[in-house]
Image (cartoon, rainbow, N blue to C red):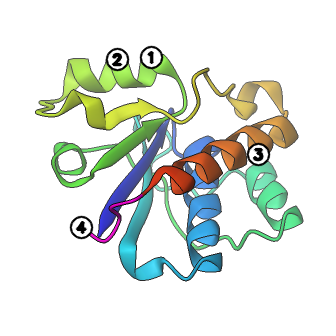
Amino acid sequence: MRKVLFVCLGNICRSPMAEMILKELVRQRGLEPYFQIASAGISAEEDGHDIYPPAKRKLWSEDIPVESRRARKITQQDIDEYHDIIVMEHYQKEKILRNYSVSHPEKIYTLLDRDIEDPWYSDDFDTVYEEIYEGCKKFLEQQKNYEQ
């Protein structure tokens, strides 16, 4: 089983959007038994909060199911357990590498080659959705050994 963790700042916009999008893409392909998908933030400031309402509305408008979940901060156990830790911005990777013991730094990388802007500040959930969807699709297309 391939364990994938998406990470953004507070775990209320981008990373839960990526979690829900990838879960739906996996579901559409009948690959649920091969993936464990979750999300977290590098900050605890939003711990316990639901997905930010505009992010939730954007997912619904694209027919992406939204599961009940609560924001949480990434942990050392996450670093040890997940095969892929996919961040939305380069600085999030740097912060994880600085603050946690990471035996395989190559498993931490950005979803796209560029940063995905935080829609909390830009309010541009359309662009963020498109970028995350593009990244999730490419990620899934590249997976060959997800049964391991």
Q: Residue at point 60% right, 73% down?
A: 67
First in sequence, mark 4 or 2: give its number.
Answer: 2
Any part of residue 12 in sight: no
Identify residue type, mark 4: Gln
What residue type is disc 2 on?
Answer: Glu
Task: Determine whether the residue tagged by mark 1 lies in a helix, strand or loop.
Answer: helix
The amino acid marked with disc number 1 is Tyr
Quote the CA–CA distance across marks 4 and 1.
30 Å
Q: Where is residue 49 in the image (x, y as percent from the top left)?
A: 55, 54
| Dots 2, 1 in contact, CB < 8 A | yes
The residues bearing labels 1 and 3 have C-alpha atoms spaced at a distance of 20 Å
Q: What element carries label 4?
A: loop
Query: Which of 112 and 80 lies nearest the eye of the viewer?
Result: 112
> Looking at the image, is mark 4 or mark 3 earlier in the sequence?
3
* Rendered view: 144 above or below 93: below
Q: Nearer the viewer's eye, disc 4 or disc 1?
A: 4
Q: In this view, does 109 lie to the left or right of 134?
A: left
Mark 4 = which residue? 148
Q: Name the residue that disc number 2 marks.
A: 94
Left or right of 80, for residue 135: right
Q: What residue is drawn where x is 60% and y is 47%?
A: 138
Q: What stretch is highlighted in magenta?
A: 144-148
Point out the tag, 2 or 3, that comes first from the N-terminus.
2
Instruction: Determine which residue is flagged by label 1.
Output: 91
Q: Label 3 amino acid?
A: Tyr
